[in-house]
Each structure stands twice: as C-alpha cells, then as structure tokens.
Image (spheres, rainbow, N blue to C red):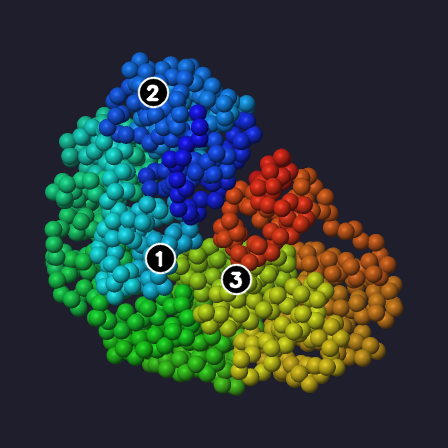
Amino acid sequence: MTPSTTVHSPLRLYGRSGELAILETLLGKLRTGDGGALVLTAPPGLGRTALLRQAAAHYLRGHGGPVLYASAAPTEQRLPYSGLHALLCSAPGPLPLAPDTVLSSGITPGALLGLLRALGAEQPLLVCVDDAHLWDPDSRAALGFAARRLGAGSRVAVVIGAADETAFAGLPALRPGPLDDDAATALLDRLTDGAADVDPVVRSELLREAAGNPRLLAGLAGRLTPGQLAGRTALPYPLPGGESVLDAHAAHLDGLSCDTHTLLLLAAAAEEHEPDGAGSDAALLLRAGARAGLSASHLDRVLFAPAGSAGALQRAGSRVHFSHPLLRRAVLHRAPPGRRRAVHELLAGLLGGGEPDRARLPALVQKACASTGPDACLAEQLERAATAPRPHGERSAALARAAALSTDDALRAARFTAAAEQARLAGDTGRARAMLARVGPHLAEGAAPYVRGMLALRDGPAADAREALLAAAELLAPHDPRRTLDALFGAAEAAWAMGDAIAYLDAMNRVPVAAADRPTAQYRAGMCAVLAGHPDRGHALLRCCLDSAARAEDAGELLRAGACALVLGEVDAACRAGARALAVVRTRGPEALLPHALEQLAYAELRSGQHARARAHALEGLHAARRTGQRNSATHLHAVLALAASVEGPAEACAAHADAALTGAGPHGLAQAAMLATWAVARADLAAGRPGEAAARLGPLVRPGPGTGHFATRMLAVPCYVEAVVLSGRAHEAGGELAVAVQEFTLWTTRTTDPQVPAQLARCRALLAPAEEAAARYEEALAHHDRAGGDFERARTRLLQGQLLRRLRRTREARGPLRDALVAFERCSARAWAGRAAGELRAAGEAVDAPDRSGPGPLAALTPQQQRIARCVAEGATNREVAVRLSVSPRTVDHHLRNVFAALGVRSRTELARLLDRGGGARLQDRDEKKRADL
C-alpha cells in the first residue's frame, strides 16, 4: 500500500496548540513503531474535523506514510458496515481484504484488528475517522474493539472524531473547548482579512455571539456586509449565519420522542427570563410540562435522568441546564414560530399566577418573547417592571426587549440607553456597547453620552472619557442632577488618572454645590483646596468628609472617603473605608464597581505595608476587571501588583506586571498607573543591587513640572530616588535635583499624616549626611519606625544602616542591623530584599545559608516563573497563550523561554516536552499540587 495524497493541509488553526501537541505526540510514537488511539470529542463547530485533517496532513508531510481517512455519511447509518467500507475504500492501494466484501459479508472485530496490524507491519499506518458517532453500530463496535488493542509495537494509530465518546469508552479522549478571546480575535482578523476598519462594537458582538465556536464565528462574519462590519450600517438582530451550526446541534436530538422535544423546548424558553448561565427552574418545568400534557413519569425520566434527554439536559439542585449553550439556541431555532410562541405564552401564564412582585418581570419577558411585533403597552410594562431590586443584568435584558417592542423612535432610543446603563452596571461592557450602537441618532437627553463616558472611564482613553462626561454633564444638568454629579466626578477621576491637576480642578469646580449633600460638598471643596495650594483648609474639609463616612452605606461615598484618607495620609483609615466599600459592593453591587473597589483597597494596603493582602486583593480585582471588560482598571491593578512584587518578588513577576501596566497606560493616557509601574521596577532594581538603573528610572518621576511623575504620588517615590542616587555614587552629580526633591519631600512631610513618612525623611537625611552625622539620623529614623510600625520600611532603614557601618569597616557592628534587616525581610516575605540583606551580611563576615534551590526534577534550577512557563510550553501552548494564562506579556514569555532553553540544555519546544515527560516536570507539578491541597 502506498501513501495517500488526497489529504490536503488545512488552513492555520487558532487556539489549538495544546490539542496539536497531543496529536503530535501520538504521531511521534507512530513514527517510532508504536501505536495508540485518541478520541476527539466536541460539540459541532469546535474544530474536530480541522484537527483530524491537520493530523493527517502533518503525518503525510513529515513521514509520507499511509493514511486511511473517512467521514461518516448520515444517510448510511442504518447500512451495516458502511462506515468501515468507506474507511477501507480510502486506501491508496490494494488491501488483503476487498472493501466490497466487508459491505456484503461484514467483518468481525478481531478480523479488523488483524487487518490493521497487517497494514501497519508494512508501514506505520494512521487511521482517521470523522463523525464516527454517525457510523452504523457494527462499524463503530468493530473500530472501538480494534482501537482499544492497538498499543506498543502495533505501528497503527487511530484518531476518531465524535460528538461524544459513549461508543468508544475506555479510549483516551481529547475534548477541545471553545476558543479563548485571543484565539477568537485572531481568527476573526483572518476572516475579515485583517481589516482595520472593523468596528470594535461589531467585533465584540461577533465574538460574544460565537462564544468561542470557530465555525459559528466564520458563519456570522461571512454574512455581514462591509458597511455592517465597519459599523456604518446597523447590525441585524439576531445575527444571521449560525444556522448550520445550530442545525448540527439540533440534529443530535432528532431521535428523541415528541414529548421529549416539547420538554426541551419548554426548558429552552424558560431560560429567556433568567440571567445568562443560570439555567431554568426545575419546579417551573414540572408545572409547565404537566400543563402541556406530559406525564409525570416522562417528566421525571427526562429532567432527573441524563439519559432521558440524550444528555441534552443536566440537573444541578433545583436548576436545569443544557449541556451546551448552543444546544439551547438550537432547540429554539428548530422549533416552528407558532409552537415557540405557544410555549412562551404557557410559561407567561404560569409565571403571572405567582407572587406579583417576584414573578411580574419574568412573566412580561415571556410575553415579549411570544409577541409577533411592536407592542407599546407591553414595552411600557417591561420598563416599569425593570427596577430594583432586580439585578442589573435582568433589568438590562428587560429594557432591551422593551426597546425592541417600542413604536416611538425616541422611546426606543431611551430604552436602549437605559439597557446599556444597566448592562454597564452589571459589568457587561460588551452588551452595553452593543445596546448603545442601537440608539441611533437620538441621544436620550445626555444619557447616551453619559454611558459612553462611563464605559470609556474604565475601558478607553482617559482624555476621551473626561470630554464625554463633561459634555454629558452639561446635557443632564437641567433634568438629572444625580447623573450630573456622577458625570462630573467621573470626569475628575479621568483627569486624576491622566495626572492632569488643572483638568481635575476644572471638573470638580463644575460640581453644583446645591445638588450635593454635605459629605459630597466637603469632599469637592477639600480636594479643590488641597490642589489649589491650601492644604490646611483642604485637610480639615477632607477629615470632616472622612468622619461622615463612619455612617455611610453607599459604595461611592465610602470610596470617596477612602480617597480622602489617602490624601490625608491616614492609611489605616483608608484601609477601613476600602474594606467597607468592598463589602457593600459585594453585597449590593454594582458588579461594575468591584474592580475599582478592589484596586483602591489594594493600593491602601500597599501604603500601609500589608503587601501580601494587597497582592491578594489586586489579583482578585484583576480577574474581575478582565471579566467585566475594564482594561483601565486592569492596568491600574497590574501597577499595584508590580509594586507588591517589588517587595515580595520574584523580580520576573514585578517586570511582567509593570510591563502590562505600561502597555495599557500608554494608549489610554493613564499617567498614574505608568508612574506606579515605573516606581515598582525601580524598587525591584534597588532590591537586586542595581541602584544606577533605579536612579535613572526615578529621576524623571520626582521632578516638578509637567511631563514628570503624577502630581499625587510622585512624593512617594522620593525615598527610593534618594537611596538609588546615593548608592550609585551619583549624589554629587545630581546635587541640585536631589536637593530640590528632598526639600519638596520635607515640605510634604508636614502636610501628611502617613506614619512612615517621618522615618523615610530621616533615612533620606542619613543617606545624605556625612558619616559622622549619619548614625544619629539612622537612630532618629528607627525611633520613628518604632512609633509607626511596619516591618518592611524599618528593615530597609536597618539594611542601609548596616551597609554604612560595613563600608566604614565597622563590620562587627554592621552585623546586628543587617541581621535584623534579614529577619524582618523574611518575616514580610520580601525575598529579593532578603537576598540583598543576606549578601551584605555575608560580606560582613557572617555565614548565611544560600537559598535552597535543590529539588526533584529538571526544573529545580529554574525560577518559579520559569517553571510555570516551561510547563505551559511543554503542554503545547504558544508564547501568546502562555502570556494570557500567566498574565504577562508575550515578550516576557519569550525572554524567559530563552533562559529556560539555556538552563536545561534543550533546543526546541519538543525537546522540552520530552524532558518534562520523562518525569521531572510531573514530579514537580505533583509537589505543587500537594502544597495547594495542604493549604
């Protein structure tokens, strides 16, 4: 038998590096004479066929060996052995057993196994079967029997694609999931030929609708016109192009009874009034099924036994879910319109008979689903019902339905705008922008610009957000004082993020005092006074605002109180206000405020020296920011994480988070995030013994004037700057600039109540003082530390004190401060700083144990970040996929990967995977998992 040439190489696959690596491992074993089997199982559209074709083409290119490849023909499912007949017919040459004989007389499973082994004895053979679940039962059984017995030395590999693995139980299974956001975006770029004019809202809507299904994404994108892709023409709703994927999902249910189809339709319709992913209420389905004439025994069998619905429905407590979201959409898509409306009307009747307040909105949503056209009365009812305490997401969905039912253009625009605002508050920025895109020329009296500005504040250029919110405030001022205040405070927040004090004052001065309550007015006046150069008056007002917050229960007021505390330097009060704000957001919402609340709390904890707690809150905030589509918040949180890592380490984490923060800060003009990230890298340089680099980074941040550090945070970096300049030997060279920085810091010390600042000022003076005066200055700093508390800052002072004594050749005296610094750094998990202290202590003549890097496996010599990257790459992930998984940049991954290759002596990803496969990586991973389990 000669190699086949009928399988062609497919186009590039996106987001499937892990699956392709597993297939490559199987093919590698086949080339060396071993065999095996693998079942690719996934719902329609996720790329089973593409992976099979890729495997076949790759084997042909790399080895040139024979390939048997067959796809199922559903119309032949009842013809015995038709599947195996098609497979054997794909052979490029004569076989020991004619395919027609198999079709006419059949073949036993043992005979098929012998045939495959005989073919493999000539040349290693690859067998690929697509849609094997649609084969006839005899062919499926024989293939499964043979595949289970093809192992080492068989020289035959079988790759089977199937919708489920039921018929091939016992075989290794690979289950490709939906594409992640990066892979789906890359695929969409290819589908649109990389067009730069694809509207961001359209892009987001396509990605959202496709839900990571590549075939569905291709169908949706292929049906849009260039004008629709560019956002010049409104998108059709629902989006066309997914019919083939939905039909393929629905085909899975074709063999079910009519009663089961009815219950599936009821379950699909019952999710229309529920939040996304919440499923449907089992009790409601039981009542609806009984009303539809279904027997109790049938309802129990389908709802409470997975086999009763062919696995389509899954029960979790009192909720019923579809096994795949597209399956629910497929059921609704396949049902005739009249039958679908009847089901919605049935559910509306059942829901309308319950508790009026609780069931009113769900009943109205079901009525809206049953509507055949615009209905002004029903739209008005939906709008009135979409109020608190309903969750923001439910309100958004109801208002969108009300807008679609509206007959008046202005009302439709206002309702779509209201739906967008509720979606924003629910943390669904994609849906919010999609709703705004449907507003049209009507701007709903400033509400639409307000929502756009608030979205840009968390996920757009800060300057754009400021301008949009100022414009919205002018439009809203005559009739909506609450949103006017929110818009102006949002504009001020954008200016703060930009580092533009003048723009901040401009926005705050526009706040109408008459519309603000007392704490809000005090906050506005206090912040304006501080930035206008009247700190005493401003601090008094801010302290009043902070005191008023002791009784506050509003998240916004508590967050403003936290900001007051930070400006005053009362970091413990800032932590308390931030913790209370977070608790309010967790219990009452809105979800959109969660990343900001976590960011402010984490920053306050950093200022108070609680680095581990700050890291935990910042990581949670980063996940929340990504989940809610708030890139600006993610950028600020990366900066906070970089600062935490500059204390705790490792240096790679600090660099990665700082790089992510700077990457996001540049395009969106987030000067504060950029400043904090740069400070973090400089502090990590200090910890690593690179004061020259630290001084070069910090110099521009601490200078006064435009284009330098952030006006509210640059003083925080002055102690690090002074230390870096002195330790690098550049104190004389930077004399004037250094003196100005210290003078400013001295003045700032009189205006803040931050307990660490007096100690930091004394430390700066000690660094700059002659040797004979420095000792007294260090003792002064330590006295301040004793009153303020905080291990990390005190340890830094002791480290510098010990360094000075050692350089004065007073090594015996130096050991005490250095030993204290080492212990304190270890106590607060400042690993890099502990390493610096240990090095100084060794230089002072005291034996200090080196960090223990021994451990099992080949990864023991790598840093923790390098270990994580090595494992991800060995699993088949690309640099971009590793970056997404570990929250770092692709450039950082590439840098570490080169070091990994050099340290381990490997030259390729394949060699790395083989090295870890021999046990070292697995042992290390088992150890890490055991540690997590113990925790």
Q: Quadrant of the N terminus?
A: top left
Q: Quadrant of the C terminus?
A: top right
Expressed as whole percent of the image width and height from the top left, the position of residue 366 reads 19, 48
For marks 1 and 3, the one nearer the N-term is 1
Identify the amino acid type marked 3: Ala
Distance between the alpha carbons at the discs numbered 3 and 2: 59 Å
Q: Is residue 589 above or below residue 9?
A: below
Which residue bears the numbered disc 3? 660
Closer to the camera, 413 or 911?
Answer: 911
Expressed as whole percent of the image width and height from the top left, the position of residue 453 reads 35, 70
Residue lying at 31% horizontally and 71% vertically, measured from the top left: 450
Residue 127: image quadrant is top left
Expressed as whole percent of the image width and height from the top left, the position of residue 344 reads 17, 44
Which residue bears the numbered disc 2? 99
Residue lying at 23% horizontally and 73% vertically, measured from the top left: 445
Residue 257: image quadrant is top left
Q: Under tag 3, what secondary structure?
A: helix
> In this view of the protein, can residue 440 be seen by the observer?
yes
Crowd around label 1: few <14 · some 14–19 · many ≥20 (10 Å):
few
Q: Under tag 1, what secondary structure?
A: loop
Q: Is residue 849 above or below residue 581?
A: above
For marks 1 and 2, the one nearer the N-term is 2
For marks 3 and 2, the one nearer the N-term is 2
The count of marks equals 3
Does 753 sit left or right of 42 as displayed? right
Which residue bears the numbered disc 1? 193
Expressed as whole percent of the image width and height from the top left, the position of residue 498 reads 47, 75
